[in-house]
Structures are given as C-alpha cells and as structure tokens.
Image: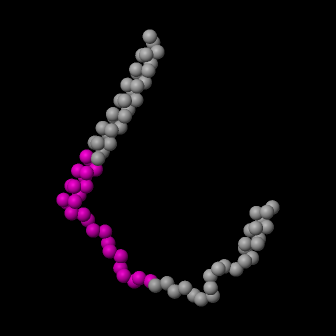
Amino acid sequence: MCSLIALAWISRSKPATSGRQIKVRLDDQPTPLYVEPLPRRRLRTSAALGGGSIVAGAVVACVISFILVALFSAITSLLN
C-alpha cells in the first residue's frame, strides 16, 4: 500500500530538467570497413592462442590429478 502511494506521489512530480532543449551533435563520417589482418598477425595470434590453450590444459590436468591423488589416498587410508 505504501509503495503505491509513493509511486503516485513520484509520478505526479515534475522532472528535474530545465525547459531548454538539449542539442546533440551528429557525426556524419563514414564508418571504416573491416580490414583483413596481415598474415603475420594472424600467425602470431594463432600461436598465442595455441600456447595458451596448452598451458591451460596442463594446469587443469595437474589440478585434476592432484584431486584424484588426494581422493585415492583418503580412500586407501580408510581401508587400514
């Protein structure tokens, strides 16, 4: 109920902006089209992505192997 009263009170108040118009400047310059990257840049990007994926895969494999070793040692210690 209080929220409806607050909404009605806010909706009848005037906005805080003044009566003057706001002018917006438009830019008519053409947008540059897509330019194909140079072969050297494409090769460098592919090498960086490939190296990063190898490093990320190695880190994930180490984390998973550490978790499996911890689980295996915990399970085998319970057998004693």
Across and down, in percent, residue 11 comes to: 72, 73
Across and down, in percent, residue 3 comes to: 76, 63
Residue 48 magenta-highlighted: yes
Report which quarter residue 40 is drawn in. Answer: bottom left
Residue 73 magenta-highlighted: no
Q: Residue at x 46, y 85 (%)?
A: 25
- The residue at the far bottom in this view is 20
19 sits to left or right of 74: right
Looking at the rendering, in which quadrant would you find the N terminus? Answer: bottom right
- The residue at the far right in this view is 1
Across and down, in percent, residue 75 comes to: 44, 19
Q: Nearer the viewer, residue 11 or 43?
A: 11
- The residue at the far top in this view is 80
**Is 67 placed above or below 55 here?**
above
Q: Nearer the viewer, residue 47 or 34?
A: 47
Looking at the rendering, in which quadrant would you find the C terminus? Answer: top left
Across and down, in percent, residue 28 comes to: 40, 83
Report which quarter residue 31 is drawn in. Answer: bottom left
- The residue at the far left in this view is 40
Number of numbered discs: 0
The colour mode here is: one colour
**Is 34 placed above or below 16 here?**
above
Q: Residue at x 59, y 89 (%)?
A: 20
**Is 42 placed above or below 8 here?**
above
79 sits to left or right of 37: right
Q: Residue at x 74, y 68 (%)?
A: 7
Q: Residue at x 74, y 76 (%)?
A: 12
Report which quarter residue 60 is drawn in. Answer: top left
What's the magenta region?
26-51
